[in-house]
């Protein structure tokens, strides 16, 4: 009986220690990425390349300052 050869990706994993992976591209910005962010419904809205991470407390303070009327500064 003839032995069936392994699939190429199995031979590659045995040789290199891990299988090669095709790059993943963000559906929002199109960049190659490593992390995808989705909302509770599963809709992707960003990746690690196109999302801006910001401290929640700093964001809240910036929003308050932006919504404060000019006359409230005491000038």
Image (spheres, helix red, strand yellow):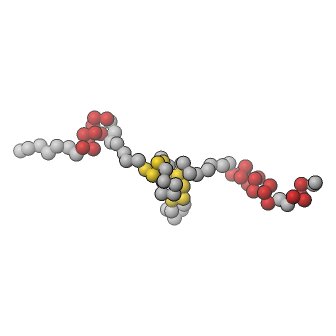
Q: Which image quarter: residue 69?
A: bottom right
**Image quadrant assignment for residue 2:** top left
Looking at the image, residue 25 sits to the left or right of residue 67; the answer is left
- Most extreme residue toward the left is 1
Q: Which residue is drawn at 76% across and 52% down?
A: 61
Q: Is residue 64 left or right of residue 40?
A: right
- The image shows residue 60 at horizontal and vertical percentages of 73, 54
At x 54%, y 48%, the residue is 49
> Horizontally, is 29 left or right of 23 in the view?
right
* Residue 59 drawn at (x, y percent): 71, 52
Relative placement, left or right, of 1 versus 62 is left
Identified at 51% across, 64% down, the residue is 41
Considering only vertical position in the picture, is 65 above or below 11? below
Visible residue check, residue 59: yes
Is residue 37 visible to the viewer in this orientation of the structure?
A: no
Q: Which residue is drawn at 48% across and 57% down?
A: 27
Query: Residue 20: x, y in percent?
Result: 34, 42
Q: Where is residue 1 in the image (x, y as percent from the top left)?
A: 6, 44
> Which quadrant of the structure image shows residue 72?
bottom right
In the rendered view of the protein, which quadrant contains the C terminus?
Answer: bottom right
Numbered disc total = 0
């Amino acid at each position: 009986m003839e032995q069936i050869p392994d699939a190429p990706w199995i031979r590659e994993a045995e040789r290199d220690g891990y299988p090669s992976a095709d790059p993943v591209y963000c559906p929002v910005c199109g960049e190659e990425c490593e992390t995808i962010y989705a909302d509770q419904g599963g809709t992707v809205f960003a990746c690690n390349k196109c999302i801006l991470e910001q401290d929640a407390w700093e964001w809240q303070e910036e929003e308050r300052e932006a919504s404060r009327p000019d006359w409230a500064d005491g000038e």
